[in-house]
Image: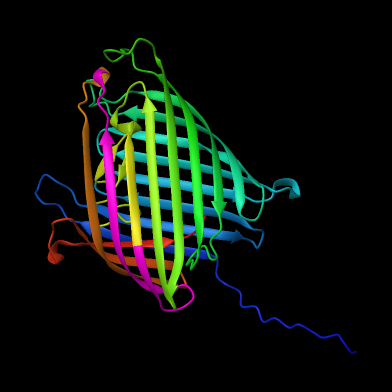
Amino acid sequence: SAGEGILQLNIEEKNTNSFDGIIGYVPATSSKDEGYLTGFVNISLLNLFGTGRAAAIRWKQENTLTQELELKYLEPWLFDQPFNLNVNFFQRKQDSSYVKRIFGGNIEYLATENISASVIIESESTIPSIDITNNSILNSTSLNTGLQLKLDYRDDIYSPRSGIYFASTYKYRNKKINSDELPIGILNDNLEYHNYELEFGFFYTLFQNQVLALGVHAKEVIGDYYDISDFFQLGGTNSLRGYRENQFYGNRIIWSNFEYRFLLSQSSYLFTFYDLGYYLISENLANNTNRQSDLNSGYGLGISLDTALGIMRVSYAMAEGTSISNGLIHFGLLNDF
């Protein structure tokens, strides 16, 4: 009839699951050594059975003694209310030094389409190797509680052309030392820590199909006593490109990522980048640690492609002061779990 019409939309279903991985074999360098596997595997299932539930598995083997395992699960809209439940498990085996395990989760309140707040609770344990006999790494368990605030005004989470992203996290950690002997300078077996994390992203279209992307990240832990298991790690694909994965560490790390993107399609682009990273190990008389800090940079170019497996990112990066022939190839897959 007059004044009425029909709106017809053609919707193409998008694959929300992703898988990527690289597995390599490093042969033995001598008759006394053994070869080992290295690489990573990421599996993300972002819409289980069409319910909006999500799960992810991440495994990474850096060398024969160092590996990470992470499991995540998301239960959206609990009891049909704007609350998401996130559960996660993380384990890192750090060479022959220690094993760290974290089990916990958070309840996220979806205040609006762009703003959310979360309450965090975690159980954390650190188990030093039997070869560590000088109390440099403490056998400990801790209860972590915290809050997180997120603001997301990006026009696209995978390849934004405009908008900002902001996330701020605070955690209070109460650590119980399980070692028989306390380190020198420590009067009781309960230690307190305050963890702060900040993440900011800015995206702006300068010209047609050309986007400026800027990211700033900061993490700091403040506490009574530090060992290496308390520190944040810096370097590699997701922070400071041009350097090895987790090459640096400190109780304070700050890094920025500047990218100039040339769009090829809705979710694919070429990019050049410049990364800057800083780490600090504060002076700590209790464990006889001197102050250490350094500022490093990396630069290079890369490509981000929208594939059937997900958003693949490959970049060639050079550290400050190195030649083109000494660059590193970084490979990763972007997902938003």
- The outermost residue toward the front is 206
Residue 109 position by quadrant:
top right
Task: Report the magenta stretch's main SS.
Answer: strand
Q: Quadrant of the N terminus?
A: bottom right
From this viewpoint, is residue 83 visible? yes
Circle count: 0
x, y percentage for residue 284?
Answer: 26, 23
Residue found farthest to the right: 1
Task: Residue 204 in the image: state x and y as whole percent.
Answer: 45, 66
Q: Position of residue 185 (x, y in %)?
A: 28, 12
Of residues 37 and 335, the one nearer the viewer is 335
Colour style of the rendered protein structure: rainbow
Residue visible at 25% across and 24% down in the picture: 136
Front residue of 172/126: it is 172
* Residue situated furthest bottom in the rendering: 2
Image-quadrant location for residue 287: top left
The residue lying at 37 percent from left, 36 percent from top is: 220
x then y, percent, for residue 79: 74, 46
Identity of the residue furthest to the top in this view = 187
Residue 242 at least partly seen: no
Q: Is residue 57 left or right of residue 121?
A: left
Q: Is residue 216 above or below residue 3?
A: above
Residue at 27% of width from left, 18% of height from top?
286
Horizontal side of 240 relative to 57 (left or right) equals left
Horizontal side of residue 110 vs 39, given as left or right? right
Q: Which residues are magenta?
A: 259-285
Q: Is residue 179 above or below residue 308?
A: above
Q: Nearer the viewer, residue 49 or 334?
A: 334
Q: Is residue 327 magenta?
A: no
Along the viewing direction, whichever of 24 and 308 lies nearer the viewer: 308
